[in-house]
Image: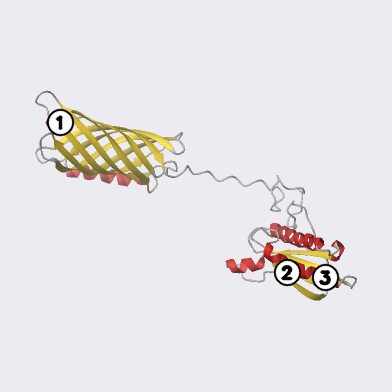
Amino acid sequence: MGIKQWGCIAALLVASTSAGAYSDELRPYLDLGAQYTGADDLRQSDDGIGGFFGVGMPLLRNFAIEGTLSGSNFGANGANGIKWTEYTAEAAGLLTYPIGNGWIPYLTVGVGVANNKPDGGDRESDALASFGAGTFYLWDRWGVRADARYRRINADVSDLEEPVYRLGLLYMLTPKPVAAAEPEKDSDGDGVPDSRDKCPDTPKGAKVDADGCEFPPEVGAPAEVVDTLGIVYFDFDRSEIKGGERAKLDKAAEVAMAKKGAAVVLKLDGHTDYVGTDEYNVGLGERRGAAVKQYLISKGVPAEEIIITSYGESRPAADNATAEGRSLNRRVELFLVEK
């Protein structure tokens, strides 16, 4: 088979990668296995027995490439036979056709170098070309493969034309992709899935808490601000009070206790960044306000003198487009207001 024929085979293989379905099962892999070579009569030897090691990488759609190193020993065929040792390095393209249930048949075309040494002779390196077919069978991270290929070695004296059969074990370097879970059903569209929704018939557009139950847009009525007692900041999607913020609340509790009996109450305004739905963020602002309220109660501030307002993401203090801005928006502001 001449250079033109090999070129046509390679061209057909590359062109055919535009057909077929993309294989999401074949992933980067290592393989190791046994190799049997039917010796050309020119060797005057028995068939070759050896092994191979390779690494492969899927590329565009259903096309992959792999590199393989192999070695074989050819025993002498009779009293006048010749022993050979052979090492090869080969790069190949694979056209895969996944058919489901772990099976991935393929066609392959490769080129490389064969290094042969006859017993008592000099070692010789020659170009080789091959084509063949085989199949993978894959589990999650492990698999097996079997293939048969025809190869031609362009030796100095005369070309060697031989069949090569391989059986190997594969290890996938990455796990099988997990299909994305379908989103939970949300019948009333309030942002809380049915499995957690305690109020499944909330009117469309209503603001709800974490349980999917409607609450007024603001808890507590607007009132004249008497004093500003500071701001407490929170981690992303959290309502727990951080240790570094407690000193602010201790000071706020002291001021509120000093005003005990006056016509004022402590108003807590909960805020969030813009990540999440409006409904969820109103609930998150409410939970942050509730956490601050419980802390202040533990410091002696009467519960009836604390009110909470949740604005969710509607009143940002900084630009939500930056991480720093979003961190400044995750907050509870404390005010003393008139009753």
**Residue 26 tag number:** none
Residue at image x 19%, y 30%? 74
> In this rendering, which labeled residue sits more in front, label 1 or label 2?
2
116 left or right of 200 in image: left
CA–CA distance in space, label 1 to label 3: 98 Å
Tell which circle, 1 or 3, labels the residue nearer the N-terminal end: 1
Residue at image x 77%, y 61%? 295
150 left or right of 338 in image: left
Q: Residue 226: tell me if it is visible.
A: yes
Q: Position of residue 320 (x, y in %)?
A: 61, 67
Q: Element type at marker 3?
A: helix
CA–CA distance in space, label 2 to label 3: 12 Å
Residue bearing the label numbered 2? 248
Residue bearing the label numbered 3? 256
Quadrant housing the N terminus: top left
Residue bearing the label numbered 1? 83
23 left or right of 51 in image: right
